Image: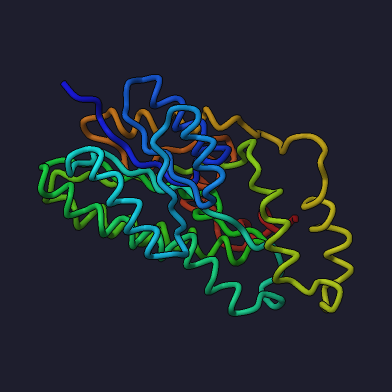
Amino acid sequence: MSARSILITGCSSGIGRDAAHSLRAQGWRVFAACRAEADCAALRADGFDSPRLDYEDPASIAAALDEVLAATGGTLDALFNNGAYAVPGAVEDLPTDALRAIFEANLFGWHDLTNRVIPVMRRQGHGRIVNCSSVLGLMSAPWRGAYNATKFALEGLTDTLRLEMADTPIRVVLIEPGPIDTAFRRNARSQFERWIDWQGSARRAQYESQLLKRLYDEGGADRFQLPPSAVTRQLTRALDSPSPRARYFVTVPTWGAEIARRLLPTALRDRIAGGA
């Protein structure tokens, strides 16, 4: 019996990298995609199939999936959409072009790849699509408007796809991480520096007292932070369960956000989320 196959995006580090190594150890044939060719080359040297896939480049999405299907004989058992980034900053300081760019990377590219994979899974008669969302897809937080927006959109799109796929053998799942020990914050700095004119902002003092310290602090871990392996454990459950749940939560803050949005009034949720 041939190994199950999975395409995972965003495998250069963090959640994607851990998932790729763990699932390979479990017997999966892992296609560990990255945006940068240098990262793909490093994974190939480690024995992975590693197509280059940049969610902001439709041609690379098509080419990556073609590479996967050529290697498997036209099948793919699972897709884990994972690669994403943030553009920290106040909404009033967020250029519209920055919002367009992050939606390309965090939503539109995911939609493009998913829609290319669905016909493959229909033909083979089974499939699992897992999207990595965030606690910030459940409950908003200040300074994170661009990322909040993409994850709230992902939640709605994925929920709809799950409902529409209910009459097919394709199952659709959301993973809901909270604070995870990855390079996410470090990667967000380059986007912040590219897009946000914080020195010219009416909120300059708040940037200095709140966001900059958090964004550039190389100190201790966030409260309740877990390693990427915590996400992989839930991903494994989502892939292995005959009847997967709609959502798999990771970290205490994510469980708390789910409870808060169900039980607490908006004013109280705003007070909880009000800090930087």
In this rendering, the answer to whether 197 lies above or below 17 is below
**Relative to residue 16, is residue 26 depicted above or below?**
above
Q: Nearer the viewer, residue 9 or 153?
A: 9
Q: Is residue 110 visible?
A: yes
Relative horizontal placement of residue 251, taking residue 111 as reference (left or right): right
x and y, in percent, of residue 172 in the image:
28, 47
- Above or below, comparing residue 161 to residue 25 in the picture: below
For the point 71% across and 66% down, the residue is 89
* Viewer can see residue 254: no
Task: Identify the residue at image location x=72%, y=38%.
Answer: 222
Count of all numbered marks drawn on residues in the image: 0
Q: Nearer the viewer, residue 212 or 21?
A: 21
Colour basis: rainbow
Does residue 17 sit above or below 173 in this rendering? above
Q: Quadrant of the N terminus?
A: top left
Q: Position of residue 219 (x, y in %)?
A: 82, 38
Q: Is residue 23 left or right of residue 151?
A: left
Q: Position of residue 231 (x, y in %)?
A: 49, 33
Asked if residue 140 lies left or right of residue 262, the reply is right
Q: Quadrant of the C terminus?
A: bottom right
**Quadrant of residue 275 within the rendered picture:** bottom right
Say whether residue 144 is left or right of residue 120: right
Q: Could you tell me residue 165's position as x and y percent? A: 19, 53
Query: Which residue shows up at 42% across the image and 32% down it?
Result: 48
- Quarter assignment of residue 58: bottom left
